Image (cartoon, rainbow, N blue to C red):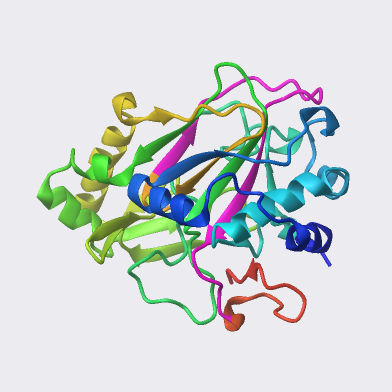
């Protein structure tokens, strides 16, 4: 079973999270992100940075203790790791590093182009919208664990509330109407899109977003005008927080309450490139009907 080895190891690991689960969740909800250090980490034991997606099985087996501890930290924090049908070949952990075949693509495995502010998997249902019984929802959290850093290359976060504070009420009202089209990100094997959805949704007094600079389009002139104003604000670097990650450091952030971005760089493809591990998390375990194959995996969510 794919992910079986690392899930089995995760089940046996305890106290992988360096802070208490209550402190972790409180900080995550209040600040929208938490920076933490994985206890089980030895940089000297890492394989070379992979350059092809086909290397994932080998890397996962060689670094299985690290992968298991990484997943264990999520379970301790009360987060349910998930992977989405049609993305990352079913692996729960994605290698965020330059891949040869993705060199010219704007995605987590591209490098040559700036990856502008976005929410991951924005074409799926977000918080505040009616939950689907058949399809998985947009991830609640996204965690990035740094294995190798690259000087001058940063993952940056922007808080949704700060972005909205720079927009007028009429623009916010337009962004909350179902007059937008969202394309599925390039990391998925097949293209898809969803139409007549809002960019932002308010739920229990908080705003949630599916904004993706590269994959969001307005379906009316008014919608596109509002979207252009939001795009402009998200590129205000004063609103960006460059996450200071050293090898062994991780950041977990609320995917729909923040946006993240990464600047371009020139990959070497020599085994030493920047390398992070990404895990999507849900705050509650998905229902069985949302799973691709519930008899074999409780983490693989349907998207079609």
Does 271 lie within the magenta span?
Answer: yes
* Residue 104 falls in image quadrant: top right
The foreground one among 283 and 295 is 283
Instruction: Work out whether 176 lies above or below 36.
Output: below
Residue 11 located left or right of residue 161: right
Q: Which residues are magenta?
A: 259-287
The x, y position of residue 175, in whole percent, is: 24, 54
* Residue 86 falls in image quadrant: bottom right
Which residue is located at x 43 percent, y 44 percent?
33
Quarter of the picture holding the C terminus: bottom right
The x, y position of residue 11, in whole percent, is: 74, 63
The foreground one among 20 and 139 is 20
Quarter of the picture holding the N terminus: bottom right
Instruction: Work out whether 300 lies above or below 200.
Output: below
* Residue 165 falls in image quadrant: top left
Which residue is located at x 12 percent, y 44 percent?
168
| In the image, farthest residue toward the left | 169
Does 214 lie within the magenta span?
Answer: no
Residue 118 located left or right of residue 108: left
Residue 105 located left or right of residue 234: right
Which residue is located at x 77 percent, y 76 percent?
296
Residue 264 visible, this orientation: yes
| In the image, farthest residue toward the top | 151
Residue 220 located left or right of residue 24: left
Residue 93 visible, this orientation: no
The x, y position of residue 60, in whole percent, is: 82, 48
The x, y position of residue 51, in whole percent, is: 79, 34
The mark tally for this picture is: 0
């Amino acid at each position: 079973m794919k992910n079986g080895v690392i899930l089995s190891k995760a089940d046996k690991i305890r106290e992988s999270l360096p802070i208490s689960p209550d402190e972790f969740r409180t900080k995550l909800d209040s600040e929208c992100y938490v920076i933490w250090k994985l206890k089980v980490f030895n940089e000297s034991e890492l394989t070379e940075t992979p350059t092809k997606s086909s290397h994932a099985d080998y890397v996962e087996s060689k670094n299985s203790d690290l992968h298991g501890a990484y997943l264990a930290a999520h379970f301790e924090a009360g987060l349910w790791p998930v992977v989405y049908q049609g993305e990352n070949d079913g692996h729960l952990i994605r290698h965020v590093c330059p891949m040869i075949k993705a060199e010219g693509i704007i995605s987590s495995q591209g490098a040559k182009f700036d990856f502008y502010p976005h929410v991951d998997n924005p074409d799926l249902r977000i918080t505040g919208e009616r939950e689907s019984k058949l399809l998985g929802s947009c991830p609640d959290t996204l965690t990035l664990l740094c294995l190798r850093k690259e000087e001058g290359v940063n993952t940056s976060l922007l808080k949704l509330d700060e972005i909205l504070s720079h927009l007028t009420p009429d623009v916010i009202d337009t962004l909350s109407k179902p007059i937008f089209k969202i394309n599925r990100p390039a990391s998925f094997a097949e293209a898809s899109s969803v139409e007549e959805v809002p960019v932002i949704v308010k739920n229990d007094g908080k705003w949630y977003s599916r904004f993706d600079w590269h994959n969001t389009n307005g379906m009316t002139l008014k919608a596109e005008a509002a979207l252009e104003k939001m795009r402009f604000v998200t590129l205000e670097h004063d609103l960006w927080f460059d996450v200071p990650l050293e090898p062994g450091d991780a950041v977990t952030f609320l995917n729909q309450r923040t946006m993240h971005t990464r600047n371009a760089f020139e990959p070497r493809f020599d085994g030493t490139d920047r390398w992070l591990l990404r895990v999507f998390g849900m705050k509650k375990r998905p229902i069985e009907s949302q799973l691709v194959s519930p008899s074999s995996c409780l983490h693989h969510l349907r998207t079609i």
